[in-house]
Image (cartoon, rainbow, N blue to C red):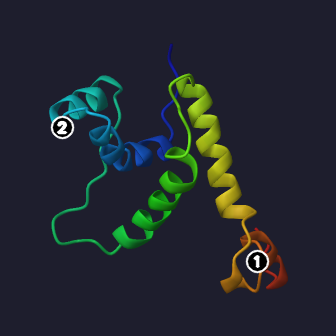
């Protein structure tokens, strides 16, 4: 089975490390799995964390709302990727945010005339 690794999957590989460690995969086992899957680990240089808070917030919410509440044992990788893609689509375009005046991000952009 082969499939194209997308930037989202590469980004997820960096965040999923904590999930794998919680499931009993050792750090060296994690690195082996990442290498075998030909995934790229994303790591900022030491002391350079300007992008970390936003990324950690998104991945933390994704894990809390999508990953942890479900048993993924019966799912294939393709099913998992479809679920993550659907969640990211919802998160970026459809979720209602009070800070945007109870609009979705797309509705807010449209109301400001910032149609993509």
Say left or right for 19 vs 89.
left
Disc with the residue nearer the chain's start (1 vs 2): 2
SS type, badge 1: helix
- Residue 101 vs 54, above or below: the answer is below
- The residue at the point 31 percent across, 44 percent down is 17
Nearer the observer, 55 or 39: 55
- The residue at the point 26 percent across, 55 percent down is 43
Residue 20 x %, y %:
32, 38
Q: Residue furthest top?
A: 1
Q: Quadrant of residue 55?
A: bottom left
The quadrant in which the C terminus is found is bottom right
Residue 36 x %, y %:
30, 23
Q: Quadrant of residue 35?
A: top left
Say left or right for 101 vs 74.
right
Residue 64 x %, y %:
50, 55
- The residue at the point 36 percent across, 26 percent down is 37
Q: Which residue is mark 1?
A: 109
* Total numbered labels: 2
- Residue 68 vs 116, above or below: the answer is above
Closer to the eye: label 1 or 2: 2
Residue neighbourhood size for the residue with mark 2, other residues' Cα within 10 Å, grouped as few (<14), some (14–19), many (≥20): few
Say left or right for 67 vs 93.
left
Nearer the observer, 71 or 57: 71
**Dot 1 and dot 2 residues touching (CB under 8 Å):** no
Q: Which mark is residue 27?
A: 2
Residue 24 x %, y %:
26, 33
SS type, badge 2: helix
Residue neighbourhood size for the residue with mark 1, other residues' Cα within 10 Å, grouped as few (<14), some (14–19), many (≥20): some
- The residue at the point 57 percent across, 55 percent down is 65
């Amino acid at each position: 089975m082969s499939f194209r690794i997308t930037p989202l999957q590469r980004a997820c590989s960096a965040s999923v490390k904590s999930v794998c460690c919680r499931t009993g995969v050792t750090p060296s086992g994690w690195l082996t799995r990442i290498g075998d899957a030909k995934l790229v680990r994303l790591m900022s240089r030491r002391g350079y964390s300007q992008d970390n808070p936003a990324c950690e917030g998104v991945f933390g919410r994704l894990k809390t709302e999508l990953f942890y509440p479900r048993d993924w044992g019966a799912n294939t990788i393709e099913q998992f990727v479809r679920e993550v893609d659907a969640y990211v689509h919802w998160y970026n375009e459809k979720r209602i945010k009070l800070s945007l005046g109870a609009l979705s991000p797309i509705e807010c952009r449209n109301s400001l005339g910032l149609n993509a």
